[in-house]
Amino acid sequence: MEEMIIAILRSATPLIYVTLAGVIAQRAGIWHLGLEGLMIVGACSTILGIVLTGSVFYALLLACLFCILGSIIFWFVVEKLKANQIIAGLGLTGLGLGGTTLAVEAIFGTPAAVNAKFGLPKIGYVFGDIFGAFNGLSILVLLMPFVVFGMWLLICRTRLGLQITASGEHPFAARSVGVNPSRMRFIALMIGGVLCALGGAELAAGSLQIFAQNMTAGRGFMSFAAVIFGASHPIGAMLAASFFAIVGALGIRAQLVFGDDVPHDLLLGLPYIATIFGIWLSAKLRGGAKAVSGFDELRD
């Protein structure tokens, strides 16, 4: 049972960090389809940072800087150039996927996978043996519940969070009371950039210590689906992302139990099937995912 819980935590933690980035962007009025691109940038930057600097701190700092830079580009294209945010998000994802491959090839002369000698600090290394079988998990797994609570506190219980939400839902009303929706969207995307960097870092350096091309494998889009499934609420989105991770862990377990009796491709596709089911169920329960009212203003 403990092994199953550990597998779920390892799978869910990167999804949850990136999902929270999607939540705060959605609150600000941004449909963030660039999550996949920022996540793989965070993963690549973390591993390259560890290899080149030998420091986890500098690696995480590098990942945050590159993801924030990507978020600034996304904000500028959507907010200042008035581009369609769906297309801009997909463009950011393409830039992240292609840019990381190009960076690895430019530095190492080959697009092959990059291995780091070590990854993120483990819980056992920081706190000793008090967590038992969970000591092998990275420190970001332990911090994840606190980050979720902090995001809930920020979005639902602070002035800044209310201003961000108002900028997404009622931008004209927000502007009438002195709130700048463009500035709120900028802040939301910057926070989201840091969260995507942490999600990518956990994916690449939490337990694997490796970066490979396209290693996010659609997790950014899965996180975007979790935002919709979780009604753009930090707790609901976290539960939705956890549900997708549980389905994925069950698929891996099923491969060990059933072997060749069940097609492997079907078991590997279970998380994506669950994602489609989640979107369908969300549409049924809430009458379809509706764009926030600020969306039309962005296009105008």
Image (cartoon, rainbow, N blue to C red):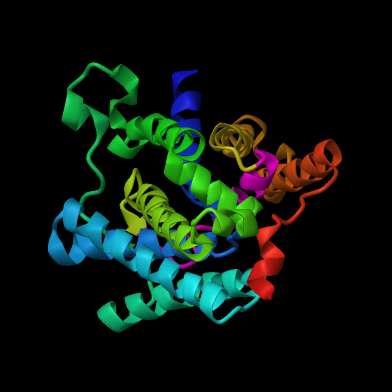
At a point 25% along the width and 48% down the height, the residue shown is 119
Q: Is residue 168 above or below residue 68?
A: above
Q: Position of residue 55 (x, y in %)?
A: 14, 55
Q: Determine the residue positioned at 44% across, 38% down.
A: 151
Q: Report whether residue 264 is seen.
A: no
Please tell me in which quadrant of the rendered image residue 32 appears.
Answer: bottom right
x and y percent of residue 84 in the render? 66, 75
Is residue 48 found left or right of 153 in the rendered image? left
Segment tinted magenta in the rendering: 211-231
Q: Considering depth in this image, is 84 or 295 the residue closer to the camera?
A: 295
Q: Nearer the viewer, residue 174 or 299?
A: 174
Q: Quadrant of residue 236?
A: top right
Is 266 inside the magenta-drawn segment? Answer: no
Residue 128 visible in the shown view: yes
The answer to whether residue 265 is above or below residue 155 is below
Of residues 72 and 112, which is closer to you in this image? 72
Name above or below for residue 161 compared with residue 294: above
Q: Is residue 222 magenta?
A: yes
Q: Residue at x 44, y 33 (%)?
A: 153
**At 62% across and 32% down in the image, what residue appears?**
250
Residue 44 horizontal/vertical position (percent)? 35, 64
